[in-house]
Amino acid sequence: MNPQAKLIFTVSLLLGTTITITSNHWIMAWTGLEINTLAILPLISKSHHPRAVEAATKYFLVQATASALILFSSMTNAWHTGQWDIAQLTHPTSCLILTAAIAMKLGLVPFHFWFPEVLQGTSLTTGLILSTAMKFPPITLLFLTSHSLNPSMLTTMAILSAALGGWMGLNQTQIRKILAFSSISHLGWMAIIICYNPKLTLLNFYLYTLMTTAVFLTLNTMKAVKLTTLMTTWSKSPSLNTALLLALLSLAGLPPLTGFMPKWLILQELTKQDMTPMAILISLLSLLSLFFYLRLVYCTAITLPPHTTNHMKQWHISKPTNVWIAIATTLSVTLLPLSPTLLALT
């Protein structure tokens, strides 16, 4: 892709995200979401492969539908209450439609079907943007309207997301699909707490972004997109594989790594809200996700490839290791002792 074109699309992404997260008016928020959608489409389809074009088409259709629902929700609310302010969303029907629209934009169950397919059709770099930056504006809208949303509906969607995200990731051999189901599972953890403690949702999202960035950047450096290629990467760079192993375990939420912090705080908050059964259920469902993270870890660091492979091995990494990988991995591993500080900052 032309560097100037890439620069324009990247700036548009930043602009769209900034407009949405800083707006008080529904029309401005919708405008920012539309700019985001239009800016990411060329980045998804830049390889001109049929899978990439298919992914871009699916993404466009889903996001356009979700944006139309957001507009419809805000117009219904304005019709009944005379308010266009995002924080003043009070009409029950509008709240219901908005929840469905945001779930569609994020990829929450039952609107999750598009996300693994789109991620599979893109490069790892674009997949990283789709999994992190593109989810920030919808999460912000959810945060701003959290006091008006239906807790029972969000809890049901959260439990289903944690269940299906873990269950459907078990059989996958494509790493991008595994990471897509991992994202759906993490969104379940964010959605279950949004009505009770919205700041915890934001903290969870920030830490999820950090850990996912570490994983995607490492995989991009290794050029690993399938489990079979991941098995042969230990000989290329043992240190990079060790970093990936730690980032994956952190993403799984194992103590004493960073990923344990949001799960611990969310379970604590759910218990305070007398939702102990939900806390037990979602923590049990996270074991499904743990299984496929451990499967990735096993393929990364424990299996050694056989000596007679049918494909050419790469015995060195073609480009130098990125400093951002080192920063993201270090933060993914070491932030748990700083939990009180991070809680105070959010």
Image (cartoon, rainbow, N blue to C red):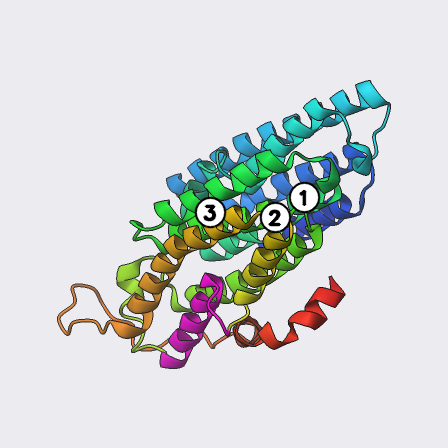
Q: Which residue is mark 2?
A: 274
Side of 315 relative to 108 (left or right): left
The residue at which mark 3 appears reads as 162
Q: Residue at x 52, y 46 (%)?
A: 278
Q: Is residue 251 magenta?
A: yes
- State how many labels appear: 3
Q: Sort mark 2 into few (<14), some (14-19) or many (20+) by Cα contacts within 10 Å.
A: few
Q: CA distance from mark 3 to mark 2?
A: 20 Å
Q: Secondary structure at mark 3?
A: helix
Q: Could one spot residue 272 in this view of the protein?
A: yes
Quadrant of the image occupied by residue 90: top right
Of residues 319 and 151, which is closer to you in this image?
151
- For image coordinates 47% across by 77% down, the residue present is 320
Label 1 sits on a secondary structure element that is: loop
Q: Is 98 rendered above or below residue 297?
A: above
Residue 1 in sight in this render: no
Disc 3: CA contacts within 10 A as few (<14), some (14-19) or many (>=20):
many
Q: Where residue 180 sits in the image (x, y, percent)?
A: 45, 49
The tag earlier along the polypeptide, 1 or 2, is: 1
Query: How far apart are the alpha carbons under marks 1 and 2?
Result: 14 Å
Q: Indicate which disc, 1 or 3, sits on the residue closer to the N terminus.
A: 3
- Measured Cα–Cα span from mark 1 to mark 3: 17 Å
Q: Which residues are magenta?
A: 238-256
Q: Position of residue 313 (x, y in %)?
A: 25, 71
Type of the residue with mark 1: Cys
- Residue assigned mark 1: 195
169 lies above or below 314:
above
For marks 3 and 2, give the one nearer the viewer: 2
Label 2 near label 3: C-beta < 8 Å? no
What x and y, as percent, mark residue 28? 79, 37
